[in-house]
Image: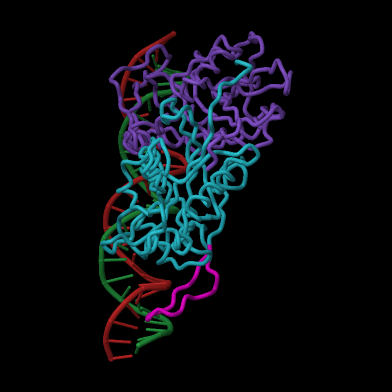
Chain colours: A cyan, B purple, C red, D green
Amino acid sequence: MSAQPPQIRVAVSTVIFALLPAPDGEIRVHLPLVRRTRDPYAGAWALPGGWVCAQESLSDAGRRTLAETTGLRPSYLEQLYTFGHPERSPGGRVVSVVYSALVRNHEAAGTGAGPVPVDNVSWCPVDDAVGLAFDHDEIVRYAIWRLRSKVQHAHVAQHFLGERFSLAQLREVHEAVLQKPLDPANFRRQVEGSGAVVPTGERLTGGRHRPPQLYRAVLTPESAGPFGRAGPPS
Amino acid sequence: MSAQPPQIRVAVSTVIFALLPAPDGEIRVHLPLVRRTRDPYAGAWALPGGWVCAQESLSDAGRRTLAETTGLRPSYLEQLYTFGHPERSPGGRVVSVVYSALVRNHEAAGTGAGPVPVDNVSWCPVDDAVGLAFDHDEIVRYAIWRLRSKVQHAHVAQHFLGERFSLAQLREVHEAVLQKPLDPANFRRQVEGSGAVVPTGERLTGGRHRPPQLYRAVLTPESAGPFGRAGPPS
DNA sequence: TTAATAGTGTCTTTAAGACATTATGAG
DNA sequence: CTCATAATGTCTTAAAGACACTATTAA
C-alpha cells in the first residue's frame, strides 16, 4: 500500500429509463442522452454525468449532474456498477460510478421526451443507443440487461408508475420491459400473491369500461436487503 | 460539469469468503481481516485493500492489494459495490471500490486460516466481524447478504470447490452458506435439471462407501450476462 | 344494449418438498 | 455380510400457464 495515491478523477454517470411510445406506436424503453460540447468526443452523444465534488456523496453527485444536464430529478437512484479501465477516457484516468433510475413519463416531459426536442438532450430507444462516447455503449448494454433481469422483483416496475396504479398498468410496464405479452389473469394472481402490492380501495374512473382497483407498492423484507432498503448506504 | 475535479483518492477493498471449520466443528463462512499498522484506526481490523495505481484496472488493484496484504490470489473477483460517503474516512475523501471472491480451503491455507496464525492476518467467522475500521462493518454485512441471496445461482457455490466435485460436496457448500439442511434427493434433481453442472464420467474413490459421480460447472446463458461472463468489463 | 376492460374459475403442466427404496463400493 | 452414502422413485402440495367465463361501468 503506497502512502501517496496517484491522481485519479472520479465521475458519475446515470442511466435513466422511461417507457415512451416509439415512432411505430409501440411502448419501448428509452433513455436520455446528452450531446457533448467539448473534447474528448465533442459532438457525440453520451450518458448524463459529471465530476464528483469533494463534499457530496456519490448518489448526490449523480442526482446533481443529472439535473444540471437534463433537468431530471428522479426520486430514487440505484448504484449500477463502477467502470475504471485505465484507457476508458482519452483525457486521463477516470473512474466512473454509474447510477440507474426509472422515471415516469410526466417526469421525463420537458426534457426532450416530447415532440419538441430540448437543446442537447435526446430520449433514445435503448436498442438504438450505440456509438456513444467513451465506453458508454457497454454501460448501456449492462444497464438494460440488469433491468430485464430484475423486473421480476416487483418494486422495479413500480418506479415507472405513480404511487397508485392499476394491475393492468403494472402489467403493461412488465410487458414493455420484457418485450412479451403476459396473461392478465396469471399476472394478477402472481402479483397479488406475492404481497408486493396492496389494494388502496380507490378506483380509477374515466375509462369507458369497468373501473379497476388501484394498488400501491409495499416494501417486502426480501427486496429490502440488509439495510432495510434496496442497496447499501453511501 | 466543472473542468477541474477535486482531489478524491480511489481505493479498493476485498471481501474474501471461505468455508472453514469453526471452533465448535461446524463449517462456517469466514473472511480474512488484516490489522492496520497506521492511523487512522491503527491496531483495528480491516478488510484487505489499498490504493489504486494509475495504470492498473480496478480489479487488478483488488488482486494486487489482496496478495500484498494476505498472500491470497483468487482466480475470480466480482465487483460488489462502491462506497463513497464523504465522511467515511477520517483522513480525507476516499472512494472505495469493493470486490468479493470465494476461495477454496487450500487456497486459504498459509494465510492464517490454519491453526498457526499468520502475522497481521486473521480469518474470522462473518458473524463475528464487527468493530472493524472505517465503514467496513457495513461492507461486510452487505457482502454476506449478497452471498446468501445469490447462492441459488449455482455458479456461486462452485467457486468454493475445485473444478470437479460431487453433488454431496456442492450440497454441503449450499448448506453452509444458507445455514440450513437440504434434502439430498431434491437438491440433486434441482441442480441436475438446471443444466448448471454436467457429469464428467469420473468417480471419487477412497470413501468407505459407493463412490459418487464427479461433476463440473457449465456456464449457463442466463448467468453469463450481456458480456458472456458474470459482470461487465473494467 | 354494447363495447371494453376488470376480475374469477378451472384445468393442465411443472416444479418443490418429504420421504421411502434400491444400488454399490469399502472393509 | 454390513455400513455408509449414492442415486432413484413416488406421493403430495404449490405454483405457473392457458384459456373460458362472469362482472361492471360508460357511452
Residue drawn at (65%, 19%) of the image = B23
Asked if residue B169 lies in the magenta stretch, the reply is no
Name the foreground residue: C18 vs B72.
B72
Q: Which one is nearer the viewer's eye here, B47 or B141?
A: B47
Q: Quadrant of residue B116?
A: top right
Residue A16 to residue B27: above or below: below
Q: Nearer the viewer, residue B163 or A32?
A: A32
Q: Position of residue B11 (x, y in %)?
A: 57, 25
Horizontal and vertical percent position of residue A104: 46, 60
Pinpoint residue B5: horizontal percent, then vertical percent: 56, 35
Magenta residues (range): A199-216
Q: Quadrant of the C terminus of chain A?
A: top right
In the image, is B194 to the left or to the right of A110?
left
- Answer whether residue A222 is visible to the viewer in this image: no
Tell me which residue sits at (50%, 19%) in the image: B63
Q: Residue B147 appears at what percent x and percent y?
A: 52, 33
Q: Is residue B44 above or below residue A190?
A: above
Q: Quadrant of the N terminus of chain A?
A: top right
How many marks the image carries: the answer is: 0
Relative to A89, residue B207 above or below: above
Residue B16 in view in this figure: yes
